[in-house]
Image (cartoon, rainbow, N blue to C red):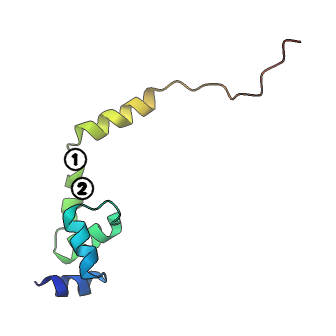
Amino acid sequence: MSLVELAARVDVTRNTLSRLERGDLSTSLGVLARVLAVLGLEEDLDRLAQDDELGQRLQDVRLRRPRRPPKGNQADDR
């Protein structure tokens, strides 16, 4: 399948597909999902983050952060 045909099936421009290929972060995840679907690889989307150790560690760090009480609601010591 040519790049022109893929772009037409995904309903994006060739420039958008080129940005996706280069890893440009301004390209939406929706475009990636549609490209995978057109190529018959939509099940591979689940595999992208399957073994993402760094992402899992970052998520764990966010879960462990203690919550602070909101400022401004404390009684004055006057």
37 shown above or below 76: below
Q: Residue shown at 25%/69% (left/top)?
A: 19
Q: Are marks 2 and 1 in contact (CB under 8 Å)?
A: yes
Quadrant into which the C terminus falls: top right
Badge 1 local density, few (<14 within 10 Å), some, or many (20+)? Answer: few
Quickly name the residue at label 2. 46
Q: Position of residue 66 (x, y in %)?
A: 52, 24
**Is disc 2 placed on a helix, strand or loop?**
helix
Q: Quadrant of residue 15?
A: bottom left
Report whether 2 appears left or right of 46.
Answer: left
Q: CA distance from mark 2 to mark 1?
A: 7 Å
Say which amino acid is labelled 1.
Gln
Quadrant into which the N terminus falls: bottom left
Q: Position of residue 23 (x, y in %)?
A: 23, 60
**Is disc 1 placed on a helix, strand or loop?**
loop
Q: Residue shown at 17%/68% (left/top)?
A: 41
Q: Between 17 and 29, which is closer to the camera in this rendering? A: 17
Report whether 11 appears left or right of 37.
Answer: right
Say which amino acid is labelled 2.
Asp
Quickly name the residue at label 1. 50
